[in-house]
Image (cartoon, helix red, strand yellow):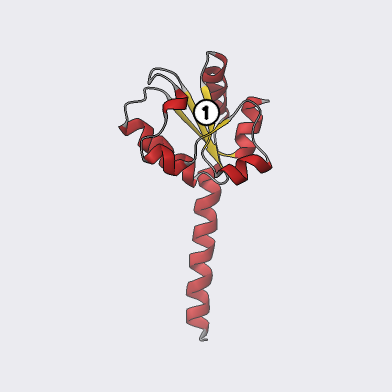
Amino acid sequence: MSPIVIGAVAGVIVALVAAKMKMARRSPEQLAAAKAALDKGGKLVDVRSPMEFGGHHAKGAINIPVGDIVAGRHGQIGPKERPVVLYCRSGSRSAMAARALQKAGFKEIHDLGPLANAAKVAG
């Protein structure tokens, strides 16, 4: 493989890793807002697969896989006025679920990104 191709591939990989790291970051204000939403009765939702959820999840979370949310199966969350706090493994699926819930008319959605952030907020 030519050095140009190797350099281009390396550049793409670095850009993807940087984008993934940026997606996972949440400010202290975002984390505090999510915690406040949970304190006022919000629902903590893990949008990973049931197998991932069964392995480890944040305290108090329910599991609704992102595919179910996108398909409109989100009745476990409750009324659309109830705050919703989402997380997944890396932030990709929680972002997708947040967009779907917003389109469905949910009023207050907090996307924590990865499980590590949810653990900080849920205790």
Amino acid at the residue labelled 1: Gln
User: 69 and 12: which one is in front?
Assistant: 69
Q: Nearer the viewer, residue 103 or 19?
A: 103
Q: Residue at x 38, y 40 (%)?
A: 70
Q: Position of residue 110 (x, y in %)?
A: 47, 29
Q: Give the SS element for disc 1.
A: helix
115 with respect to 93 (left or right): right
User: Which quadrant is the C terminus positioned in?
Assistant: top right
Q: Is residue 21 left or right of residue 96?
A: right
Spot occupied by residue 121 in the image (x, y as percentages of width and height): 62, 27
To which quarter of the image does residue 97 belong?
A: top left
Question: Left or right of 94: which side holds 70?
Answer: left
What is the total number of numbered labels drawn onto the structure image? 1
Q: Reply above or below: 63 against 108.
A: below
Q: Looking at the picture, tell me which residue is in the foreground, 123 or 29.
A: 123
Residue lying at the far top of the rendered structure: 40
Give the crowd class for mark 1: few <14, some 14-19, many >=20 residues within 10 Å. some
Q: Residue at x 58, y 28 (%)?
A: 28
Q: Looking at this rendering, what residue extends furthest in the bottom direction?
A: 1
User: Quarter of the image holding residue 35?
Assistant: top right
Residue 69 percent across, percent down from the top left: 41, 37
For image coordinates 32% across by 26% down, the residue present is 105
The residue sitting at 50% across, 72% down in the picture is 9
Q: Position of residue 80 (x, y in %)?
A: 38, 21
| Residue that mark 1 sits on | 30
Vertical comparison of 3 with 14: above or below = below
